[in-house]
Image (tube, rainbow, N blue to C red):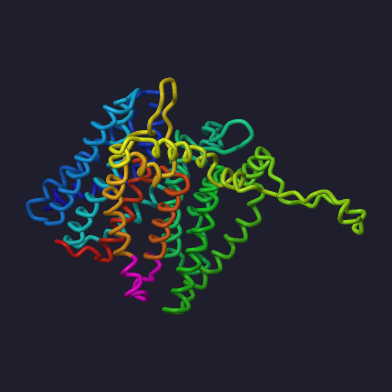
Amino acid sequence: MHQNRSFLVWMIAFIALQPVVDVLTTISAGSSITAGIVLRFLYMAAMIVIVLMMMRKSRMAKIFFWYLAGLAALIAINLGVNLAVKDPYLLFEELKFFNKVVYLHIVLFGLILIYRQLVAMGDDVMERTKKMFFYSSLIISFVFIVSLITGTSLENYRWSKIGFTGWFYAGNEIGAIMAIIIPVVAMVAIHQMTSWKKWYVWIPFVLFAFSMQMLGTKVGYGAVIIALAASVLAVGWQHFMVEKKAKWKANLGMLAVLFALTAVTSPFTPTFHNVGAHIDLLEIDWGQSSSDPEDPEAPEEDAPEEDEGVTSEQMQNLIFSSREVYLQDFVDDFASAPLLQQMFGMGFAGNYEVDERPTMIEMDYYDIFFSFGIIGFIYFMAPIIFFLFLIAKRLITRFKETMTIDNILWGTSLVLALGIGAMAGHVFTAPAVTIYFAAGLAVVLVNNRLIKVK
């Protein structure tokens, strides 16, 4: 029993090691098989073994197994259809893509089974997972700060924009990871700060938020604001609706200080510079009046036409950073694709052409839809939608009981993950990010006992 528990605990501890895996991936960048691919594939294989081993005693494990078998069948059909339709057909790239996207379900199902097993052994899985997220944040902050001080940080942009990714190779992925983690970092600080004398417990949050600002992305900046706002909601609810304590009052004061600090420093952050650079690139005019300010009584007929200001196309490009262009290309490809591709998907990067570099939209729901088709998309999303329905149902039916600090901030983490998946991608399609979303969703489901199947 002890050996079994140790193995399950180590499977959770792997979450804390993700930044180390990502740095090793950077070192091996350029190789077709990186350290991250190998280590995450082994972790996924271990999760499959766990599902298989638990099938003997767990009905839920059997459900998970048969779902995964169905997903494998749909992918096999997808590969067969596209092998016949797509020319060229990059089999290795197609297989690599599907290996990435199945990571979500395999790791999510595995963690649900692990958490349930540990809960039965008396383990506090929410506290354990919280620590793993927190340890990840400490490693990430350390990497960012040391790399910036030593001048060894990788750059997140070229040309007019500025931003840094530390020693992490993929800027979009580390940005999504940090956005998912930051509400949990705030959660740890809230519980540790019992009075103003312990103001220093917020230092890890400040360093982590600083690192996110250095990314220069809208995702990083927005996630800091949302995490602070959710923390105010969580602590405010606890203080005014549950129990008034000096601890909660001190936390509210600290959050007010952090909001003020963010507001004061925002104009000097890479994100603000990059938004300005993007606006200049798009030649956006925010509707400034073009009439002569020195002659306010000039005849109306002599006044030049008013500027239309920002167009919808410019605003979409500012928000989605050209993803809307790729989206339209995929929509056109899908509309002209054969019926089998529409039903079972166009595979990786759609119907790419010879001498064309295959690219994804980087908006997860669209990427999954076009890759898996109508049938595959419904099947892929069904468990996620079902689990989110269970959470929403609990929130509606047992609102006051559910509104704890931990649930609010874990919920914020999940909302950020889902939102980033929609706007910037890499949540469902990048295993480095997927594991955090899967762990957060699994711990909320199990800790709140939302899954009744044994």
User: In the image, residue 10 lies at what x, y percent?
Assistant: 24, 46
| Range covered by the magenta-colored residues | 392-406
Q: Which corner quadrant holds the C terminus?
A: bottom left
Residue that appears at 66% across and 56% down: 264
Would you place residue 185 above or below residue 46 in this image?
below
Residue that appears at 49% across and 58% down: 227
Q: Is residue 396 magenta?
A: yes
User: In the image, residue 281 lies at what x, y percent?
Assistant: 66, 37
Side of 109 where 186 appears, left or right: right
Would you place residue 239 above or below residue 316 in this image?
below
Residue that appears at 29% across and 42% down: 343
Q: Is residue 366 magenta?
A: no
User: In the image, residue 56 lies at what x, y percent?
Assistant: 7, 51
User: In the image, residue 90 lies at what x, y percent?
Assistant: 33, 25
All told, the count of numbered labels is 0
Side of 164 where 452 appears, left or right: left
Instruction: Name the residue nearer the viewer: 52 or 75.
Output: 75
Side of 82 where 319 appears, left or right: right
Would you place residue 232 above or below residue 438 in this image?
below
Instruction: Name the residue nearer the viewer: 236 or 7.
Output: 236
- Location of residue 331 (image quadrant): top left
Residue that appears at 92% across and 59% down: 297
Instruction: Name the residue nearer the viewer: 387 or 90.
Output: 90
